[in-house]
Amino acid sequence: MPMLDIAAVPIAKGNDYPPPFAAAASGRLVRDLATAGGLEDFVATYVTVPPGGWSSQRHWHEGEDEIVVVLSGSATLVDDSGATPMHTGDVAVFRKGDANAHHLRNEGDAPCILFAVSLPECSPVHFPDIAMRWSPDAGYEVE
């Protein structure tokens, strides 16, 4: 059956950022829906961001588009333009190569659940706030 039982999809807690940058997103829970469904062409995740938590460090992708839908709760989208509230049903899109770094912060009192879709990361990802980048060949490096 093509329907996934989200509760049965394994959870990855936290992130793989090096210290001290891992702390802000350490409480997020990520379920890899694409892998659970046997899909290979794109990444689809179901992400729970706890109150006070971040979805990630602020970043941008050189070669992968990204789309995020708020399924429940609320978040604040932080990018180079400032802070924008997002609520259930809101959608944000991030074009590959656009150096406007972004992330979502849960500044509310309840968990925020996000659905995110992108291609698998095959190109550098930049984290300008912490002067770091990630690439498939080298992993995390200071810029």
Image (cartoon, grey):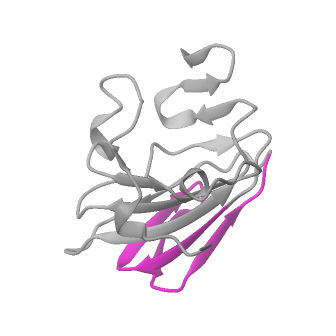
Magenta highlight range? 67-96
When asked about the image quadrant of residue 3, the answer is bottom right
Q: Picture coordinates of residue 141 (x, y %)?
A: 55, 15
Q: Picture coordinates of residue 29 (x, y %)?
A: 34, 53
Q: Give the answer, above or below, for where 70 lies relative to 19.
A: below
Residue 105 in view (yes/no):
no
Q: Picture coordinates of residue 88 (x, y %)?
A: 45, 85
Q: Give the answer, above or below, for where 69 lies relative to 30.
A: below
Per the image, is 126 magenta? no
Residue closest to the eye, 3 or 90: 3
Q: Residue at x 26, y 61 (%)?
A: 50
Q: Residue at x 49, y 36 (%)?
A: 129
Q: Residue at x 42, y 68 (%)?
A: 6
Q: Quadrant of the C terminus?
A: top right
Q: Give the answer, above or below, for where 85 lies relative to 121.
A: below
128 relative to 47 in the view: left or right: right
Q: How many marks?
A: 0
